[in-house]
């Protein structure tokens, strides 16, 4: 019994450590920051106009919030996973999302802007949602991952349409993030994800809309 308790405490402490690292901006990417096809050439990318810089910063702040939420969701779902395989899958996805978190944070600095001031709120809310999804069982938790990642993939595609053409650095990051999110959804499907009911999908979209609208400015 004590071993089980110790194991649970270890997992909880690990989740708390991840939360502190995520919210403090101390996350470090394992992969290098994606670069555009023209990176490293003799030609410098075009300088962004102030209006373009402001738009790129707002979009990348929203993407950074998405990665804060992803850390919370995956950590909570790993904490409530019923099987070791499920837990490892969630933690593996979280490690890749850490790259996204670090990339978007770095890009915000390069754009002379800041992360959302409400990141602690986004993290806490997402962690609670992840716990709820995890407690429904591994199949439902995986189904939540599939729907979340598909919605995020569509969201990133819309950002590629909106980002200034001259902002090749942000576009390269978003393109790699989009590819990773699609793979996470496919991995969850292959692991036995259960389909989400339509009302749940609608609620997820509505919640994401509120978050992205607020994070665009705050």
Image (cartoon, grey):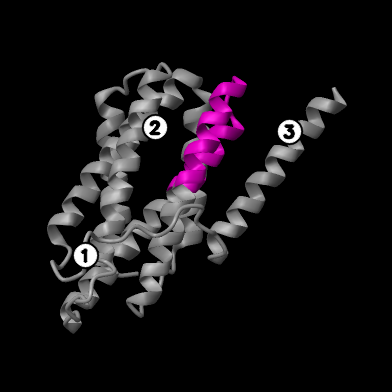
Q: Disc 1 versus disc 3: distance between alpha carbons? A: 48 Å
What residue is disc 2 on? 145
Instruction: Say if the magenta span includes residue 19.
Output: no
Judge the density around disc 1: few (<14), some (14-19), many (≥20) Cα neighbours within 10 Å: few
Q: Are circles 3 and 2 on residues that touch, CB within 8 Å?
A: no
Q: Are circles 1 and 3 on residues that touch, CB within 8 Å?
A: no
What residue is disc 3 on? 8
Image point 50% across, 32% down: which residue?
A: 132
Q: Is residue 196 above or below residue 42?
A: above
Boundaries of the magenta span: 70-96
Image point 46% across, 45% down: which residue?
A: 96
Q: Disc 2 versus disc 1: distance between alpha carbons? A: 34 Å
How far across and down, in percent of the image, does residue 197 sit? Answer: 29, 22
What residue is disc 1 on? 38
Is 197 left, or right, of 154 in this rendering?
Answer: right
Is 100 left, or right, of 175 in this rendering?
Answer: right
Q: Are circles 2 and 1 on residues that touch, CB within 8 Å?
A: no
SS assignment at label 3: helix
Q: Residue furthest front?
A: 42
- Residue 126 appears in the figure: no
SS assignment at label 1: loop
- Which residue is nearer to you in this view: 135 or 179? 179
Image point 61% across, 58% down: which residue?
A: 20
Nearer the camera: disc 1 or disc 3: 1
Which quadrant is home to the N terminus? top right
- Which residue is nearer to you in this view: 148 or 160? 160
């Amino acid at each position: 019994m004590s071993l089980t308790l110790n194991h649970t405490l270890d997992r909880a402490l690990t989740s708390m450590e991840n939360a502190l690292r995520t919210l403090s901006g101390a996350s470090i990417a394992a992969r290098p920051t994606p670069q555009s096809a023209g990176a490293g050439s003799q030609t410098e990318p075009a300088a962004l106009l102030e209006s373009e810089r402001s738009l790129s910063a707002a979009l990348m702040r929203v993407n950074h919030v998405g990665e804060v939420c992803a850390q919370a969701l995956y950590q909570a779902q790993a904490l409530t996973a019923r099987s070791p395989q499920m837990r490892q899958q969630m933690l593996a996805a979280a490690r890749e999302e850490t790259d996204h978190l670090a990339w978007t944070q770095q890009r915000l600095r390069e754009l002379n802007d800041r992360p959302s001031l409400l990141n602690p709120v986004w993290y806490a809310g997402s962690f609670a949602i992840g716990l709820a999804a995890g407690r429904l069982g591994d199949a439902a938790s995986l189904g939540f991952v599939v729907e979340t990642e598909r919605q995020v993939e569509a969201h990133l595609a819309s950002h590629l349409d909106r980002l200034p053409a001259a902002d090749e650095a942000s576009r390269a990051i978003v393109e790699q993030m989009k590819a990773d999110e699609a793979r996470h959804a496919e991995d969850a499907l292959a692991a036995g994800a259960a389909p989400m009911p339509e009302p749940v999908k609608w609620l997820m979209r509505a919640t994401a809309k509120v978050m992205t609208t607020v994070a665009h400015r705050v």
